Image (tube, rainbow, N blue to C red):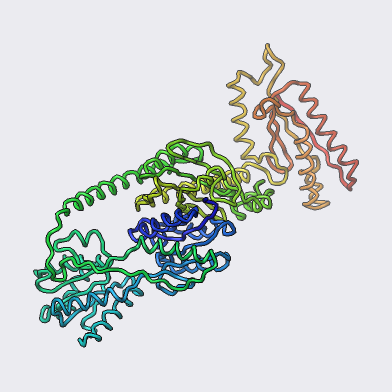
Amino acid sequence: MYSKKIALFISHIYGEYQRNLTQGIIDKALEYGYQIQVLTTNDGEALGTLSETEECILRLPVYSNLSGVIFASGTYASRALRDKVCEALKDCSVPVIEVNDTDPFFPNVTMDNNSMLSMIVSHFITMHGAKRICYLGCKNEPYISGKRLSIVRDSMSKNGLSFTDEDVYICDETPDDYNTALDHLSKNGTCLPDAIICYNDRLAYELIIAAENKGYKIPEDFGISGCDNSAAGQNMIPALTTISYPVYDLGQIAVDNLHSLIRGKERSVTSVFAKVIYGGSCGCSFPADKRVHMYTHALLAQIADLEKSIIMSSKIASAFGAASDLEDMLDLIASYAGEIENCTGFYLALSSNWNNLSDKILTLTASADALNDDQKEDDDSLTLYLALQNGKRLPSCTFKGNTLLPDFLMSDNENARVVSPIYNHNNAIGYIVMTFENNRVRYPFKLIQYLVNLSQLLNTLRNKKRSDAMALHLEEIYMKDDLTGLYSKAGFDYYENKYLDKLKAAGSSSTDDPASDLSIYDMTVDVDNLKEINEKYGRESGDLAISVLGQAIKKSLPEKNVDDPSDEQAIAGRINGGTFEIIIHGTEAQIATTKKKILSYLDNYNRLNPKPYTISATITTLR
């Protein structure tokens, strides 16, 4: 039954509007037999590096596997991100239904803002005898605020009443500005309005608080109405007169229309009609709500939950800050994921190149990883680092990037999947997938703190890898001689001390050990006639002689212990000019063999590469 998939692009899913819209879409999609993927973002929340990950949401769905898409474009605070989603959907060749009334590109479902707002204006006039009605707009949401202002203005005109600029104030939602709004709309207290229609409930109850602080009584001095039917507005005394939008129904109708498009039926614009709720702030008789104490209890619980989330976020940030490896953090990530309310499935997936070094760093450090760049670019696999399902930890695995999760997890088609990006760097992506009990989405705002910390953890681990690569390269530059690849003077001095300390700790000495024929030998090797070669044949010839001797020394040192590569028997370095020093822990026979190999190498080189000068060396040995 559930062989079809649809996706929902939505932002700020933790908002009341978004949550109800999402729930309506999920419930109706499952009725039709669609598997639903909810692709969420949090644009506009100033979340630091997490904000930079938002665009990778476009790469997560496999569009060829989708039957259709619902695009809740009105939920995007960032117009730039909204436009990028729109462009991606134009190219995906699947039916799209848009939920928005602001410049929709696709067939859309929208709320009717006009008739109910006009009804509130008429209500104030006919039921309460209002002559002067004002409007309090919202500076932060100018488009919809402007549309609602136009409706109020037109409604006043149709009722034969004047409406001037003095009857309008656009508020920036600061405490002082609500006081300024009251002064403006009441003409500094000399001419009170009969009613003030507010852009939404939030502005309405903030205005009521400001008005009562100034000594006004609502609705006795003037009525106030809101819009959006918030819980806070309905639990005031008197409750707000407002407009209730059936957002859940909006989501269901969006799925109905998408299903029709998928079946080949045309759809253009569908309007969903709201209704007016007469609370009492307009002047109507309204008994006190007997359940206000329940709302107070809910607020106290919410405050306690937020305090807990702040503490949890601090603990996560502290724990993640000391991380050196992702595997070491998985248990901690899992423990915090287990605290997400009603979450039955939590999955962390990262692309195979999530912590690859950038091309610049690879070039700077001459990293061997650069050899596999082409392979890595073609590798579209992902790794499921963490999988929690119904309280059980599943093993991690790798899967192809043509699905959100491995096939065995996607086979559970009755679950809606909520997807959030957490990481995006150099085309690498990371995201989490969540499922909720009975598909009742519980995506609280505090979850964003967790996502921020998780994303920062991944950035920290990548930066650590970069820092380690740079530190290793700097060490190589400082400790190694560019011309020969052996240790430099600084490197030789450093590793000579470590080498001798290691031998001392192991019980060796610089003299013959009665129980062993091993000793520590110090060999000095000098390029013969280096000054003459430089003066007569040039510096390049002198450097060549030094380089050839360096290679001769490399090829002649005793081989490392196969069973323990760290157990070196010798170290060598270029001390200055054409002088090299070698420390060997071995036998006299090994010393003789090493000398012979060095001289033989030089002899063979001279015979195979005839030059007007001979590369030779003088070797001095001390024990």
In the depicted structure, whether residue 528 falls above or below residue 256: above
Quadrant in which the C terminus is drawn: top right
Q: Quadrant of residue 175?
A: bottom left
Can you give x and y, in whole percent of width and height, for residue 303 in the image? 25, 50
Which of 61/155 is in front? 155
Query: At 23% across and 50% down in the image, what residue appears?
Result: 298
In the depicted structure, whether residue 525 falls above or below residue 277: above
Q: In the image, 52: left or right of 141?
A: right
Can you give x and y, in whole percent of width and height, for residue 403 in the image? 57, 51
Query: At 62% across and 51% down in the image, what residue appears?
Result: 380
Can you give x and y, in whole percent of width and height, for residue 318 in the image? 38, 42
Which of 191/577 is in front? 191
Which of 147/377 is in front? 147
Q: In the image, 123: left or right of 488?
A: left
| Residue lying farthest to the top in this orientation | 514
In the depicted structure, whether residue 513 falls above or below residue 560: above
Q: In the image, 449: left or right of 95?
A: left
Give the number of marks.
0
Can you give x and y, in whole percent of width and height, for residue 393 in the image? 47, 36
Which of 277/455 is in front? 277
Query: At 79% across and 47% down in the image, what residue appears?
Result: 544
